[in-house]
């Protein structure tokens, strides 16, 4: 017990293993987590910004930079030969920097940037390091041009796919709208027959109105702020069919055996009237509106008469 008390006192005075470990950890300099990673990732951030800047530029801009880089390196190779006499070597002869050697220097710069390397022109001295840097920079810029060409081709294909999909959906909408109009006309003929049963007429009118409402919603969703603007003739055909469908539906509302204004049927008619107004007000492009004004006025007139 005495040894235990003495050991406890010594542990309290001098600190045990945990205290010593904690003290050593506390005495270490604290490195801010914000500064060290930033210092290590600075080159990576610079490269990221550089490639992002290249990605935002056009193909013509990158090509101009690539060509100016080749010409600049070629002039530097030629100037180095004129200044020191040890620039480039062609066919065992050192280029002395005469104006006749300028074309050879630009030629060497081109084959270096394209990473061809025929070996007929050789850099000497420090220009060997510069040639390696030019080759790397040329490959980066040339690769950026190729990637932009590929991405542009993909954009064209994507736009073509969207256009074909839009035209396909628009064609199906027109077909369905004509089918609904045919159904409404068939119900109108059934309503004019003396042997028609009122219950059957009511069921057909409610069913045709519900299908017509669904097709109107599809037309609104397809034409409201579309990625592709439909042709004027196609849009005129849709508006004409829509106006004819509204007219047939108004005729059915006055025939004998027409359904009563129940809550569900009244809601369907209100939806048809509201969506028809929205199609005329929000889905017709402004450049088509003056020429399609007659159909738009007719649709709005028929939709208001259903209220």
Image (cartoon, rainbow, N blue to C red):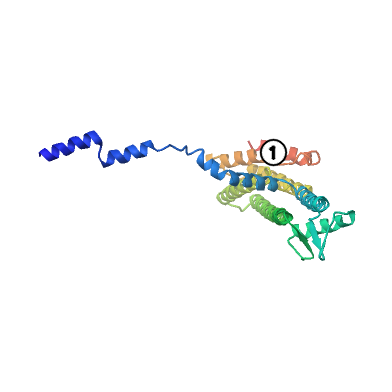
Q: Residue at x 55, y 41 (%)?
A: 39
Residue 280 visible to the viewer: yes
- Residue nearer the viewer, 52 or 238: 52
Q: Which residue is drawn at 89% across and 56% down?
A: 100
Q: Residue at x 74, y 39 (%)?
A: 296
Residue 257 visible to the viewer: no
- Residue nearer the viewer, 178 or 32: 32
Residue 144, position as x, y percentages in the image? 70, 53
Residue 238, position as x, y percentages in the image? 72, 48
As drawn, the residue found furthest toward the front would be: 84
The N terminus is located in which quarter? top left
Image-quadrant location for residue 29: top left
Indicate the secondary structure of the residue bearing disc 1.
Answer: helix
As drawn, the residue found furthest toward the top would be: 13
Residue 246, position as x, y percentages in the image? 68, 44
Q: How crowded is mark 1: few (under 14 residues within 10 Å), some or many (20 or more)?
A: few
Q: Is residue 71 toward the left or the right of residue 247 in the image?
A: right
Q: Is residue 269 toward the left or the right of residue 5 in the image?
A: right
In the figure, 247 relative to 145: above or below? above
The C terminus is located in which quarter? top right
Q: Name the residue under label 1.
A: 282
């Amino acid at each position: 017990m005495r040894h235990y008390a003495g050991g406890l006192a010594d542990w309290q005075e001098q600190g045990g293993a945990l205290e010593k470990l904690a003290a050593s950890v506390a005495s270490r300099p604290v490195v801010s987590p914000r500064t060290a990673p930033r210092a290590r990732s600075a080159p990576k951030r610079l490269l990221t910004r550089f490639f992002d800047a290249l990605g935002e530029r056009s193909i013509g801009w990158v090509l101009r930079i690539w060509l100016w880089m080749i010409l600049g390196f070629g002039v530097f190779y030629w100037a180095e030969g004129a200044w020191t006499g040890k620039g480039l070597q062609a066919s065992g002869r050192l280029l002395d920097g005469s104006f006749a050697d300028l074309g050879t220097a630009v030629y060497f710069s081109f084959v270096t940037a394209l990473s061809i390397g025929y070996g007929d022109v050789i850099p000497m001295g420090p220009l060997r390091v510069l040639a390696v840097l030019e080759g790397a920079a040329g490959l980066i810029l040339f690769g950026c041009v190729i990637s932009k060409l590929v991405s542009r081709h993909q954009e064209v294909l994507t736009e073509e796919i969207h256009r074909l999909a839009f035209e396909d959906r628009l064609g199906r909408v027109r077909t369905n709208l004509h089918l609904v109009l045919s159904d409404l006309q068939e119900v109108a003929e059934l309503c004019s027959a003396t042997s028609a049963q009122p219950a059957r007429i009511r069921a057909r009118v409610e069913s045709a109105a519900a299908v017509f409402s669904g097709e109107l919603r599809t037309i609104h969703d397809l034409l409201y702020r579309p990625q592709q603007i439909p042709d004027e003739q196609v849009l005129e055909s849709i508006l004409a069919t829509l106006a004819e469908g509204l007219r047939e539906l108004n005729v059915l509302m006055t025939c004998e055996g027409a359904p009563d204004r129940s809550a569900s049927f009244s809601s369907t008619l209100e939806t048809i009237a509201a969506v028809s107004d929205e199609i005329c007000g929000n889905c017709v492009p402004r450049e088509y509106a003056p020429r399609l004004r007659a159909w738009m006025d007719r649709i709005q007139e028929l939709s208001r008469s259903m209220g």
